[in-house]
Amino acid sequence: RTEPYGSSGIAMGFNASLAFGAYLVFAAVFLFVIMFGESEMFQGTIVERIHYWTTEGWCVALGWGLRKTLGKEKGERVFGVINHWVCERANPFMQLVYLSLVIGGYYVFVAYGFDLIGLYVHPAHAFVLPTVMILSLMQWLRVCWSDPGVINASNLEAHYRAHPFDGVLYRPKECPTLGITVPARSKFCNTTKRRVAKFDHYCGWFNNVIGENNLRHFIVFLAVHVALCAYVAYLSTAVVYGEMARRGLLAAEFNTRRGPRRLTEDWLLLSKFLVYHYSPLVMLIIFLVVLVIALGSFLVYHLHLINKGMTTNETFKWKYVRKYMQKQAEEAAAEAASQNTAGKIQAQRNEGLDVLDEADVGCVGPTGGEAAVVAKTVKTHRSFWDRLTGRRKPKARAEEMKNIYNKGFRKNLWEVFHPPSQAVAQEMQEMGSMTSANAGGSKRKKQKDR
């Protein structure tokens, strides 16, 4: 009744099971911290600290260590080279992590469950699974190699027309790097050294920026991978359940300290049995469920942003502006604010937005020292629980500001899959062709009249 699964090649030593489970738990925690550690909700918590040390802090610590061991001058020189090629430039580290997780998870199922598909689920799944896996990798490559919407001289005018300035988040100003008037909703990415239209965030999983032209590919990527993880979790669960049912383990009794017990009657006993005898597939199921929750939450978050007509970059800008407006409202509630005070706060708000334009933006918020400095100027002293539950809301209410880029969910979603700058560029090209044709016709008519 307690026969290991070795006859089918699924038994593992208990130590190996613990090691594999620890790896999957670590990978799940790592993914959560990388994806959500920048969120305002986790400011001042250990999640934010872990995120800092796994993304930026280790680079700072490396520089400190090199200066201490090699001397200040030589350490600065060596660190400058490492910092340039590893910390400040786009690199494929996170892409390799993605491939190791996807290929590793697929290998576990193929090694321990693929041969049993025909016994417990329809044999067609043996062909569906590799197909879905290939499509998922193809979608990942599509996001990696896609153009996020890089702004250049040929499409600059189209971006001016597609995205007007709102006077709140965006106003005409010059890009210090490119020397052009910055189109609204665009941002210069410090990692890839490109100005991207409707900048959302830089994503290390693709080593690419998510912007106007590839946001649709990113949304599809999230949806496909949520479906893939749920699908493999279902197959793994069906295989484990089918094997236990075939062996009669669900009705078998086991001698415990509390007397004979069935697996279906004792969840602790069932958990121990599954972890020991079916550990690879059980750990894979747990890992995939965590991924479904994490990626599903991220997909819902981006659909929420689409519904609000905002990008990840703009959500932080709006939070920043609203905090300044809230600060102004609270000061006005305490005493009548003068015009000079209002003007000073407006200038501080504009200055803060300029700094945020230079800060890097990750999955759910800005990163880097400049963004941290700006965040401190508008930091609200609220606990993690208050931020999570929305308690202790300020009494004074700031003036509501309208987001002119929010056109309703259906229109916003349409613009995600049909970027407006591309439509404007096509219209400009057609108008140019018609103008050229009309000019050519007029020229031929004049020559004929002569």
Image (spheres, rainbow, N blue to C red):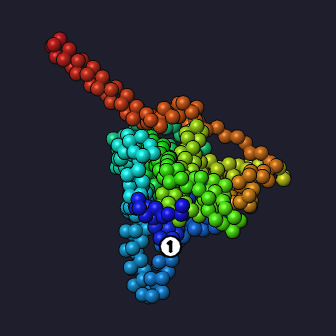
Question: How many numbered marks, from 0 up?
Answer: 1
* Label 1 residue SS: helix
Q: Is residue 347 visible?
A: no
Q: Residue at point 43% right, 33% down?
A: 418
Quadrant holding the N terminus: bottom right
Q: Is residue 164 visible?
A: yes
Q: Residue at point 39% right, 35% down?
A: 422
Quadrant holding the C terminus: top left
User: Which residue was labeled with disc 1?
Assistant: 15
Q: Quick check: 225 left or right of 384?
A: left
Q: Quick check: 388 left or right of 32?
A: right
Q: Residue at point 53% right, 53% down?
A: 248
Within-10-Å neighbours for mark 1: few <14, some 14–19, many 20+? few
Residue 81, x across and y down, in percent: 37, 74
Q: Quick check: 445 left or right of 274?
A: left
Q: Residue at point 47% right, 77% down?
A: 62
Amino acid type for the residue under numbered disc 1: Asn
Asked whether 230 or 89 is in front, the reply is 230
Residue lying at the far top in this picture: please name it.
449
Residue 260, x across and y down, in percent: 67, 62
Residue 437, x across and y down, in percent: 25, 22
